[in-house]
């Protein structure tokens, strides 16, 4: 009996130890435009902020799951009938295209570093080395990110968080140097890129699909094709079979997220602030932990306090699966 109790105690201790504590709440402040009802954009890097506040490395290359976002205006809505404040939360689509584009960018960056280390006596990378995407989309490939605050308005302090840089040979003594963003066109021009669109690159370097596939009947007037035609509809049915749905239901060249096909993040939550100056939004899946807040207020320079609550999970206390 005592042995059984010891085993139960050890199992309970192991279960308790596996529950990693983590700070899961991040509060940001955004200041609206000085012109009332004018929309402004603000950006968040969840992985960077969780790493700093929890004092442990948090890989950016994951999908971070947010349970709830609460938005509060510091100013009371002054009169009935006034336009409500608005907020939308946007993220990169959580699709196989975006995930594979990000993984492809990471693989190329890691290969670049491994190739460089082949001729070096030093084959060690930094302890906290991780592929970090600089921007969410081509409209802001190098954004200034919001900084979490405590309830006194004091900023979180950061350590070393450098966004990954590609060094591309260009036949000169120097190299083309650029970072990356997920959605939209490349920033810059060949020989002078400043940021590469990962979905754009992924689509441009993959073999495309055929614009149609072989159909059941090539000639609807063939006598054997009409062998069982007891009426006058077989020709029409066969003609429909030959021309309908013979191509994919998606654009065969332009991937969602490249330079011409939905090249901005998707709105995943949005709402208007109520009469009490607040709104609560639901869950969000943030690829690479990158988010965009778009806000507007009927009050110039109105300040919104935005509380982001991460879901608890198995990745160092946070719900964040690898790509």
Image (spheres, grey):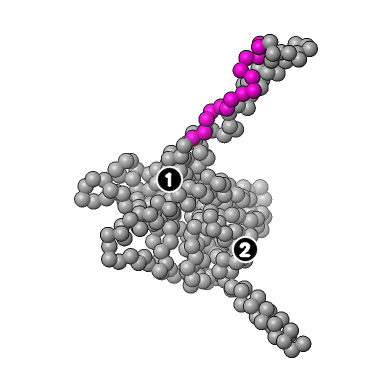
Q: Is residue 106 within the magenta segment?
A: no
Residue 291 appears at what percent x and percent y?
52, 54
Residue under the point 72% across and 15% down: 234
The location of residue 192, given as percent across then percent down, is 30, 44
Residue 281 higher or lower than 154, as above or below: above
- Tell me if residue 46 comes above or below residue 265 in the rendering: below
Nearest the eye: 91 or 155: 91
Q: What residue is pinned by disc 1? A: 197
Query: In the drawing, does residue 55 fall left or right of residue 229?
Result: left
The spot of residue 81 in percent (x, y) is 66, 47
Sequence-earlier tag: 1 or 2:
1
Mark 1 Cα within 10 Å, few/some/many (few <14, many 20+)? many
235 or 63: which is nearer to us? 235
Q: Is residue 169 left or right of residue 309?
A: left
Q: Is residue 207 visible?
A: yes
Residue in view at x 74 percent, y 89 percent? 2
Q: Which residue is mark 2?
A: 311
As drawn, the residue found furthest toward the front would be: 224
- Determine whether, in the image, residue 106 is placed left or right of residue 176: right
Q: Residue furthest left?
A: 173
Residue shown at the point (70%, 85%) measured from the top left: 6
Extreme right residue here?
230
Q: Depth check: 146 or 222 in front? A: 222
Q: Which residues are magenta?
A: 208-222
Residue 25 visible in the picture? no
């Amino acid at each position: 009996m005592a042995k059984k109790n010891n085993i139960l105690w050890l199992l309970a201790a192991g279960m308790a130890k596996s529950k990693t504590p983590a700070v899961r709440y991040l509060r940001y402040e955004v200041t609206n435009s000085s012109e009332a009802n004018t929309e402004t954009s603000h950006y968040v890097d969840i992985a960077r902020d969780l790493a700093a506040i929890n004092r442990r490395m948090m890989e950016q290359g994951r999908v971070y799951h947010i349970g709830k976002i609460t938005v509060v205006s510091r100013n009371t809505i002054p009169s009935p009938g006034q336009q409500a404040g608005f907020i939308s939360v946007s993220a990169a689509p959580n699709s196989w295209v975006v995930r594979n584009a990000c993984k492809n960018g990471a693989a190329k960056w890691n290969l670049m570093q491994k190739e460089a280390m082949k001729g070096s006596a030093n084959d060690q990378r930094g302890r906290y080395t991780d592929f970090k995407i600089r921007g969410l989309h081509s409209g802001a490939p190098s954004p200034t990110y919001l900084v979490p605050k405590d309830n006194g308005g004091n900023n979180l302090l950061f350590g070393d968080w450098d966004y990954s840089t590609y060094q591309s040979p260009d036949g000169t003594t120097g190299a083309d140097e650029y970072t990356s963003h997920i959605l939209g066109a490349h920033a810059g021009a060949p020989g002078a890129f400043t940021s590469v669109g990962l979905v754009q690159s992924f689509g441009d370097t993959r073999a495309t699909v055929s614009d149609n596939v072989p159909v059941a009947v090539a000639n609807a007037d063939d006598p054997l094709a009409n062998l069982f035609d007891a009426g006058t509809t077989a020709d029409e049915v066969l003609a429909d079979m030959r021309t309908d749905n013979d191509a994919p239901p998606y654009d065969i060249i332009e991937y969602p997220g490249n330079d011409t096909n939905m090249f901005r993040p998707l709105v995943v939550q949005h709402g208007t602030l109520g009469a009490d100056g607040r709104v609560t939004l639901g869950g969000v899946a943030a690829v690479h932990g990158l988010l965009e807040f778009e806000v507007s207020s009927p009050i110039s320079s109105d300040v919104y306090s935005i509380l982001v609550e991460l879901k608890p999970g198995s990745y160092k206390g946070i719900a964040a699966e690898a790509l």
